[in-house]
Amino acid sequence: MLRFACPFCHFQISVPESDAGGRIVCPACSKTVAIPATRFDNGCIIGDFIIQSRIGAGSAGTVYLAQQISLEREVALKVLSHKNMTEKGVTTFLNEARAAAKLSHVNLVQSYAVGEDDGYSYMAMTYIKGETLKSRLKREKRIPIDEALHIVQQVAEALCYAWNESRLIHRDVKPDNIMLTDDGIAKLTDLGLAMNQKDWSEDMDISGSPSYMSPEQFAGEPLDTRSDIYSLGVTLYQMITGSLPFRAISISTLANQHFNQKPEPPERFVPGLPSTVSSLIKKMMAKKPSKRYADMEELLDAIWRLRQLTAPNRNLVPDVHTISIRRLNYGIQTEYVNNKRRQDRIQRKQLIANRPSLASRVMLVVLPVALVAVVALYLFSDIRRRSLERSMFGHVDAFERLASNPDIPVERLNVESAALIDEFAGKNAVRSDRIGRYVLSHINYLLNQRSDKEKTAAGAAASSETTAVLENQISLLNDEIANLKTIVVPRLKEEIDAAIKEGEVYHSDLIAAQHDLVKSKADFNALTKTREEELAASDELKINNLRQRLHQLVVTQRFSLARQMLTTEQLRSPRLDSWCTEMMRRIDFLDRVYAVFAGDDTDLGTITDAEAKARYTALYGDDGRTDETILCAFAVLCGDYDKAARLRPEDPEITATADAVAEELVAAARILHTMGEKKLPAMFAETMARLPKTPQTTAAASTINVLFSGFPQKN
C-alpha cells in the first residue's frame, strides 16, 4: 500500500501502489488530491514521518527532509537503498543508528528513531541546516587557518566524547561526514563504520575511505582513537592546503603512500603558514600511532595552545570541552585587530611628537648638575689614587714576609691574598690599572712559589695512595676475568651452539619449503599450459563452426545476420574478440562488394572479372583497394574459394574457411549415407570443385568418394 498525507487537511490516505500517479477524493475534506507517483515523493508517509523534500543521496541510501507526525518536528530521514538491503547492509545501517542514539553531544548528529516500513529500512536523525565540509571545500578550495583549526577542534571534541563514553572509533572521518551548520557548529555524521574497540577481530573487513585511512587501518591491525586522529589530520591538511596529501589511481598504490611516503609539507602550498600549524599536522599524520598524540585530550590541548598564538583574537577561542555555540565572526576579529593596531600607531606618533620638548626640559636641569658631578668625581678619584699608591707598597711587603715564612699555612696566605686583592684591585676599591696589574702579578708569584714546595711533599704521599688504588682495581679485574672464563663464556657457548643447531633446522626446513615451492610452481605451469592448450583447441573448434556458418550466410548474402552472430559471439567469448572484429571488417567489405550487383537479377556466376571490377569502380571510384582484393571478395561471394586463394595466397583465412567448409561437407555426406542415400547430390561436387587443394580438402573429397562410390578417390 502507498500511504500519503492530504495536502489540505493532512489526513492519512492509503491506496494500492497500482493507483500511483492518479487522483483520489480525500475522505476527510472531500477534495480531489493527486496521488504521489513514487513511494518517496513529497507527502508520502513512511513510519511516523511525512516526506517533505529530498536532501541528497549517497552510497548507502537517500536522505529526505521529513516531518515527524507524533512530535511535530523536522528530521533528516535516511532510507536504505535497495542494493544495500542485504544482511550486511542492514546490520551496518542498524549499527549506525544504535551508535548515534547512544551518544548525545553538540558536535554529533543524534539518531531519534529507526524502523522498517513496507520493506524499507529508515533512520530519523537530527536535521542540520547547513552544508558538508566537502561542499564548502569544493566551492572555496581552502579554509582560513584559524577557522580550519576551529572545525578540527569541534570534531575532536565529538571523537573525544565518543571514545570516553563508549570506546567508539569512527573509522571514516572525512569532509563528507562533517556537517557545518548555519550557526558555525561542526557536526560529525555517519557512524555506519564506527566500532567499539573491544569488538575488533582479525577476520574483520577492512573498511573506510582510502584517502583518509590510517596505515594500521589498511593493515587490519587493532585500532584505537589514534586512528581517528590520523584521519582528522588528513582532513586538516586538505582544509589548509586545498588538496589531499596522497592521491593515486589504485588502492594498493594509495595504501603504499600512507605506509611509506611523506606528504608534501603544507607550507609549500601556503606561504607564511606558521610552523606550529605545520608541526601539528605532521604529528597528527605520523605513520606510527606511538608518534601521534596519545589521545583526543592531548590533541585538544595542543590545538587550544596553538590557537592562543595564531588566532586573530584569542578571546574568541573556546576552552577545551567548552565549544562555543556562536559562529566565529572572522570579520569582527579582523576589525578588532585592525582597531588595536590603529590605536598603537596613534600612541607611538603622540609619543614621538612630545619627545623633543620633554628632552629639552630634562637637559636644562640635568646638564649643569652633571658637569659639577664630573669635576668633583675627577678630583676625588685623583686624590684617592695617589693615597692608594702610597700605601700599596707597605701592604705588599708585609704579605711577602708572610709568604716566606714556612710556618704560615697556605690557607692563611690565600685569605690574606684575597683581602689584599679586594683592597687594591677589587671592584669596591678606587681602581688603577697600573696598581691592579702589579698587585695581582706579585701576589700570584709569591703563592706559586709556596705551592710548588708543598706539591713536591704531597706528591710522594699521593703516589703511594694511587698505587694502592691501582692494585685494588687490578685485583677486581682479575676476578671478573675468572668469572668470564668459568661461567659467562661457557654459558654463551652453549647458547650459541643451540642457536646454530636451531638455525640448521630452520635452514633444512627452508630448503624443503623451497623445493616444494619449485615443484608447486612447475605443477602450476604445467596446469596452466594444459589449460591454455585446451582453451586454444576449444577456440579453434568454435572458430571452425563460425566459419561454416559465415560461409552459409555470405553465399546467401545475409550480411546482417552474419554481423549479429559475430556481435553475439564477441559478448559470449571475449577470447575471440580480435578474430570476430576482423571477420566483421571482412563482412562489411563483402556487403560493400555485393551492393554493386544488388540492383539487378544477374547471376553472380555469369559475371566476368573485368565486368565485376568495372562495376565496382563505377560505383565507388578508386578507393585504394587492389584488383586482387576486389576480385577475391567477389570470388568469396560466389563461393569460389579456390579462385580466392589463388588471388590472395598470403591470406590464411581463405584456406582455413575452405577447410571448414570441406569438414562441413563430410559431416553432411555422413548423414546422407546413414539415411541410405546412394547418390551424392550435385551441389556437393560443385562445392568441392570450388575449394582449393589442401590436405584437409583432399582428405574430405576422398572420404566423400568412399562413402558414395565404394572405393577411394585417385588423384
Image (cartoon, rainbow, N blue to C red):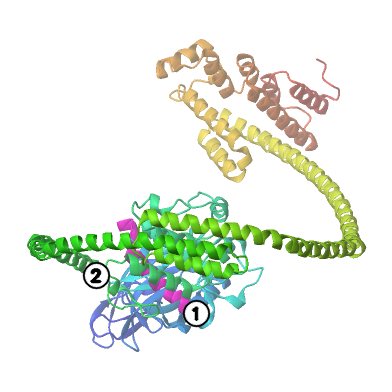
CA neighbours of label 2 inside 10 A, class few (<14), some (14 to 19), many (20+): few
Number of dots carrying numbers: 2
**x 59%, y 38%: residue:** 577
**x 91%, y 60%: residue:** 485
Across and down, in percent, residue 252 comes to 57, 52
**Residue 303 in sight in this render:** yes
In the rendered view of the protein, which quadrant contains the C terminus? top right
**x 46%, y 54%: residue:** 245
Report if the CB atoms under discs 1 and 2 are less than 8 Å apart: no
Report the disc number at residue 99: 1
Place residue 23 in its image quadrant: bottom left
Pick whichever, 35 or 550, lies toward us. Answer: 35
Pick whichever, 535 or 381, lies toward us. Answer: 381
Mark toward the start of the polypeptide (1 vs 2): 1
Overall secondary structure of the magenta section: helix
In the rendered view of the protein, which quadrant contains the N terminus? bottom left
Q: CA distance from mark 1 to mark 2?
A: 33 Å
Report the disc number at residue 329: 2
Across and down, in percent, residue 249 comes to 50, 49
Q: Amino acid at mark 2?
A: Asn
- Look at the image and give the residue range highlighted in magenta: 137-164
